Image (cartoon, rainbow, N blue to C red):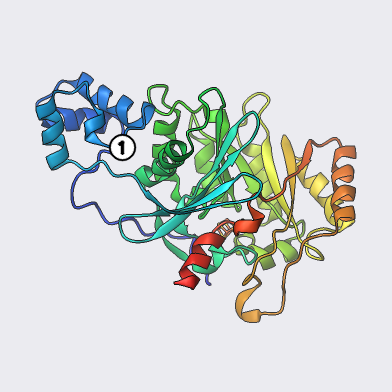
Amino acid sequence: MAPTWDRPAPEAAPPPRPNAAGMDLPELKALAASFGEPAWRGAQLFGGLYRQRWTDWEHFTAFPKPLRTRLAEAVDLRWPAILHSQPAEDGSTKHVFGLEDGLQVEGVHMPYERRTTLCLSSQVGCAMGCTFCATGSMGILRNLTAAEIVGQVVAMLNHHAPPAERPVNLVFMGMGEPLHNLDHLMAAFGILTDPQGLAIPPRRITVSTAGLVSGIERLGAFPKRPRLALSLNATTDEARSRIMPVNRVWNLEALAQALARFPLQSGERVTLEYVLMKGVSDSLEDGRRLAAFARRFPSKVNLIPFNPHEGTGPGPRGAEAFAPPDEARVGALCRLLSDAGLPVAVRRSRGQDVAGACGQLVRDLRARR
Ligand code: SF4
């Protein structure tokens, strides 16, 4: 699949009727005004949609009944629908969301003792073409709208109703390259972090990029933004360009320089996600190069043993199949990085028994149909 990240991704067709789900506060105030209502009615709409996560006009009981009826007649309130949910033995649940145009994306709910983490998609498919990734083999179909991004959060929180006192973390590590859809991502970020909306603190939201340097630079210019993670996965340009084609445009040196320039706040670190693939990225020499790369800017390293699934490899060229590393090597690399003074953790891909790699469940469902 030829990578196409150098041009904007296709956009969703405009909805046939206005849809309040996903509108920001100025849009909701304008919507209220179009019904002859004062601006504070727009603020009430915002609170109902995002603070309360209401999904039906009948839930807005503070509104006079005639207003609710007029809204229901003229304005939709539609979030992405959960079409399919697949729980895993580790407690996580992978959801497939149906979009208005019949396309599908996926998100994952991961409950932990002290937090809830939601893994979100940012695009339908992906232009980046990483050879180890199920989504990469789909190509890019289109960007998600801000409503579709926020809608994944609303749908999963309403479905699982996690305890209010347990903080919610959001990670954009599902389908798509979030920095290839930065405009809609940041519009969604505004709603997700608004204290009158979903009120998720910016430091609890992380976007993971494959290394789109133009997007990293744009993200760094926002005064308020999510945290940044880099999906690194190899330590030589030869290996990284082979598995992540974006490296042929912005190589490791360009990436390190962009991350060293990235305006981090006090105490903030870039997360380096490093998938360990046997014979590709898991040598001790890889570990030493990884440590040298990571020390060029404030960072922390997540080592992720590869989650084997069918159908990956460098496509038409064929022969390379990826495999998980030996456990002893995972431990050795973890010690090497820790001895180098780096914060390091080993992360297991959750939901491995239910097609846990990004894009894998949607692809499997499509294949079954
Ligand atoms: S790993 Fe991420 S950036 Fe790469 S193809 Fe998959 S979804 Fe896209």
Q: Where residue 139 sits in the image (x, y, percent)?
A: 49, 66
Residue occupying image coordinates x 54% and y 68%: 137
Q: Callout 1 environment at 10 Å: few (<14), some (14 to 19), or many (20+)?
A: some
Element carrying mark 1: loop
Q: Where residue 20 sits in the image (x, y, percent)?
A: 25, 38
Instruction: Say left or right for 33 vs 160.
Output: left
Where residue 66 sits, quadrant-wise, is top left
Is the CB atom of the residue marked by disc 1 within 8 angstroms of ligand 1's nearest atom?
A: no
**Residue 3 visible, this orientation:** no
Q: Where residue 156 sits in the image (x, y, percent)?
A: 46, 41
Q: How many marks?
A: 1
Instruction: Say which residue label 1 marks.
Output: 55
In this picture, is 96 found above or below 280? Answer: above
Q: Where residue 283 sits in the image (x, y, percent)?
A: 86, 59
Where residue 198 sits, quadrant-wise, is top left
**Residue 42 visible, this orientation:** yes
Residue occupying image coordinates x 65% and y 66%: 309
The amino acid sitting under disc 1 is Thr
Residue occupying image coordinates x 42% and y 37%: 158
The quadrant where ligand 1 appears is bottom right
Viewer-nearest residue: 127 or 155: 155
Q: Where, quadrant-wise, is the C terminus in this rendering?
A: bottom left
Viewer-nearest residue: 14 or 263: 14
